[in-house]
Image (cartoon, grey):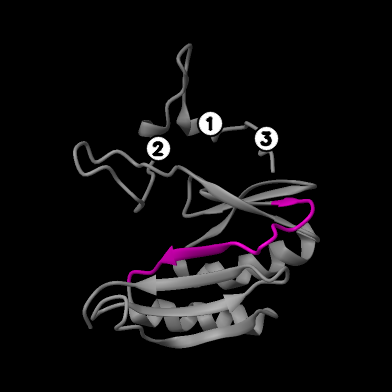
């Protein structure tokens, strides 16, 4: 999937190109030595952008995500101001992709699950502890319209 290169205006530095460090990147995978974000964004191919956009808009809202950028065949979701998860029209990935979104609380995981299943997602593991990962791993899993395994996870103790 190719994502159009149209950064948010607040991420631009005149004459210097894209400067994502000026954006609020939010929580993400960061390098231990420098604190820099290691994964800036990711995405999946979907068969029907409108259907998937409606699903992800509802499913990710409890996590603070919104549609930040969109075109007819693409949509970028994230915690404003920057998208970090993209969907793009095309042949859905085979095998389907697993994407986990970090939640700040177990209540957010529960809300994600309710919103995702309410938006047509199929249950792939209800909210609960997954102690085989670690003692405080609390997650929920839902299959999106194309069968991608979408998870919300909280690592914090109750």
Cα separation, mark 2 vs mark 1, equals: 10 Å
Residue 43: percent from left, percent from top: 60, 51
Of pointers 2 and 1, the one earlier in the residue sequence = 1
Quadrant assignment for the N terminus: top right
Residue 75: percent from left, percent from top: 67, 50
Cα separation, mark 3 vs mark 1, equals: 15 Å
Above or below 17: residue 23: below
Q: Secondary structure at mark 1?
A: helix
Q: Is residue 126 left or right of residue 52?
A: left
Which label belongs to residue 52?
none
User: How many discs mark residues in the rendered view?
Assistant: 3
Q: Secondary structure at mark 3?
A: loop
Of pointers 3 and 1, the one earlier in the residue sequence = 3
Quadrant assignment for the C terminus: bottom left
Residue 134: percent from left, percent from top: 26, 76
Q: Is residue 33 left or right of residue 15?
A: left
Which label belongs to residue 4?
3
Of pointers 3 and 2, the one earlier in the residue sequence = 3
Q: Is residue 149 left or right of residue 111?
A: right
Residue 98: in magenta span: yes
Task: Bin the neighbour count of mark 2 within 10 Å (Cα to Cα): few under 14, some 14-19, many 20 and up.
Answer: some
Where are the magenta residues, as a range? Answer: 88-104
Hey, which quadrant is residue 54 in on the image? bottom right
**Residue at the image position 59 percent from the left and 62 percent from the top:** 97
Location of mark 2 (residue)? 23
Task: Bin the neighbour count of mark 3 within 10 Å (Cα to Cα): few under 14, some 14-19, many 20 and up.
Answer: few
Task: Bin the neighbour count of mark 1 within 10 Å (Cα to Cα): few under 14, some 14-19, many 20 and up.
Answer: few
């Amino acid at each position: 999937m190719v994502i159009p290169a149209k950064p948010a205006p607040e991420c631009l530095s005149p004459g210097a190109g894209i400067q994502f460090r000026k954006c609020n990147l939010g929580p993400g995978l960061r390098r231990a030595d420098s604190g820099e974000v290691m994964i800036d964004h990711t995405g999946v191919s979907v068969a029907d952008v409108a259907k998937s956009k409606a699903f992800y808009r509802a499913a990710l809202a409890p996590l603070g995500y919104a549609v930040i950028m969109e075109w007819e065949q693409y949509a970028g979701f994230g915690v404003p101001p920057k998208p970090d998860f993209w969907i793009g029209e095309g042949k859905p990935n085979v095998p389907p992709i697993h994407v986990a979104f970090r939640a700040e609380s177990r209540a957010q995981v529960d809300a994600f699950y309710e919103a995702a299943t309410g938006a047509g997602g199929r249950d792939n593991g209800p909210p609960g502890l997954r102690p085989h990962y670690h003692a405080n791993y609390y997650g929920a899993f839902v299959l999106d319209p194309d069968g991608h395994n979408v998870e919300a996870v909280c690592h914090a103790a109750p």
